[in-house]
Image (spheres, coloured by chain):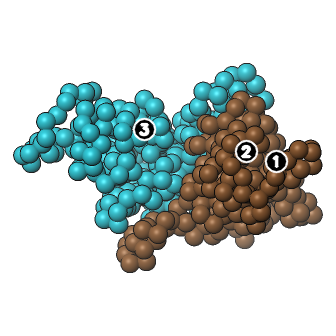
Chain colours: A brown, B cyan
């Protein structure tokens, strides 16, 4: 919570502290209300500064959220290392489980991923989008290398395909799994329509398993993946 | 193009005609500028009526686009019937190709699919969202039945999974494949970052092939899907 009123930040460490306060406020609000509902004015109000003061630190609302997305990718890659660095080779179900969890444990990251190509990347400067892309690509490539270490029958390109596809799906499935109040009420009252809702973690894990099975089959039909 | 100025519509057929004009204007503008950039005021201006007159026909901007999404699902299902009704059973590559094309030939549908859970379903009445969900679910189920007829080794639930996953991906990959001007310029000038861009049709076809291979392998490891 950062509701105290700041004086104008003058020293470098004060500026960094204020930048962190802005990112923290955006994070709290987006987790509570969803990324789509958080405006620049909401963030400024929560930090306790004027909108014009906030714009000395970030270009646009979208740049703030793009910064949070980059931070989420880095945190996500650290978590994958922690869970997969010591994993024995060969287990596709383990990779599917770890990746599904890595997204479903990060609701804000999933929400942000859906907004990134749709909104966030479209309202920032070339520098901001370049910095963001370097981070997201770097983290996807790092995650792909981790997959390849556990599943060496896949090429690095195939592992990148797996990671990028699952990340895209995590973004759109999270939106479906977290409907607004009107749709949530409809799902509760109409079982036939509830079929359209999604339970994020099992759906992601199952899709990850199918993708890995498909990738492995098309490379090596008699691999260890065959049941039994 | 519907730029003529309407008088107030009084007879039922005039009302239907005006509703069509509104949908047509929204369709033209969304195809030209992208769904995210089209406001209610833009649509009203293109039809040549006042915003308040438009709101006699549709609740919100989002209801107009949800109506276009429902229309897109129906048109998409008709196209799948035309391409698959006479297909010989057994060809997963054919199913992958037809489904990838069914989305990549429909840029407005892809754009709308990404906006649906994120925005469109969150700003309409319960009645409007119920009507939309019945249509989209109905069309997904119809498409799944078509897949099962060609690939009878899959269950209907697996076919639904395939169709729903590919549709979600079509939405998010379309956004990535159609970046804004800043990002497009960056891709053109920085080959390392261009790796993050996507060519929609081949990517969707490849993912469809992987999904079908994965689904078929996990059901029937010694099926006709094995190469050779």
How packed mark 2 is, by other alpha carbons closer than 10 Å (few <14, some 14-19, many 20 or more), is: few
Query: Which chain's residue wears label 3?
Result: B
Residue designated by label 3: B38
Q: Which mark is residue A8?
A: 1
Q: Quadrant of the C terminus of chain A?
A: bottom right
Between disc 3 and disc 2, the foreground one is: 2
Q: Position of residue B28 (x, y in %)?
A: 35, 32
Q: Chain of mark 2?
A: A
- Residue B218 visible (yes or no): no
Query: B86 or B28: nearer the eye?
Result: B28
Q: Earlier in the sequence, mark 2 or mark 1?
A: 1
Asked if the residue at tag 1 contacts the one at tag 2, i.e. Cβ–Cβ closer than 8 Å, the answer is: yes
Query: Taking the image as drawn, is residue B55 in sight?
Result: yes
Q: CA–CA distance between discs 2 and 1? A: 8 Å
Q: CA distance from mark 3 to mark 2?
A: 30 Å
As drawn, which residue projects farthest toward the front?
A: A7
Where does the N terminus of chain A fall, quadrant-wise? bottom right
Give the distance between the C-alpha atoms of the residues marked 3 and 1, in whole angstroms: 38 Å
Which residue is more in the foreground, B61 or A39?
A39
Image coordinates for residue B94, horizontal then vertical, percent: 48, 42
Residue labelled with disc 2: A53
Q: Are discs 2 and 1 located on one and the same chain?
A: yes
| Residue at the spot 41% in from the left edge and 33% down from the top edge | B31
């Amino acid at each position: 919570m950062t509701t105290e009123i700041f004086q104008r930040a003058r020293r470098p460490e004060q500026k960094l502290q204020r930048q962190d306060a802005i990112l923290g406020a955006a994070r709290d609000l987006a987790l509570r209300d969803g990324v789509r509902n958080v405006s620049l004015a909401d963030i400024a109000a929560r930090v306790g500064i004027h909108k014009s003061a906030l714009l000395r630190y970030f270009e646009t609302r979208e740049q703030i959220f793009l910064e949070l997305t980059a931070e989420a990718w880095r945190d996500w890659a650290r978590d994958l290392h922690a869970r997969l660095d010591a994993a024995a080779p060969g287990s596709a179900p383990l990779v599917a489980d770890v990746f599904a969890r890595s997204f479903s444990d990060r609701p804000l990251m999933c929400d942000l991923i859906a907004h990134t190509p749709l909104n966030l990347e479209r309202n920032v400067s070339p520098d901001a989008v370049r910095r963001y892309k370097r981070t997201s690509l770097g983290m996807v490539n790092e995650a792909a290398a981790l997959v390849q270490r556990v599943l060496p029958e896949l090429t690095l390109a195939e592992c990148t395909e797996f990671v990028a596809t699952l990340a895209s799906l995590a973004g759109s499935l999270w939106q479906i799994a977290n409907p607004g109040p009107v749709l949530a009420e409809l799902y509760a009252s109409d079982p036939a329509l509830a079929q359209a809702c999604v339970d994020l973690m099992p759906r992601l894990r199952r899709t990850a398993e199918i993708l890995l099975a498909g990738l492995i089959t098309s490379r090596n039909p008699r691999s260890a993946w065959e049941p039994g």
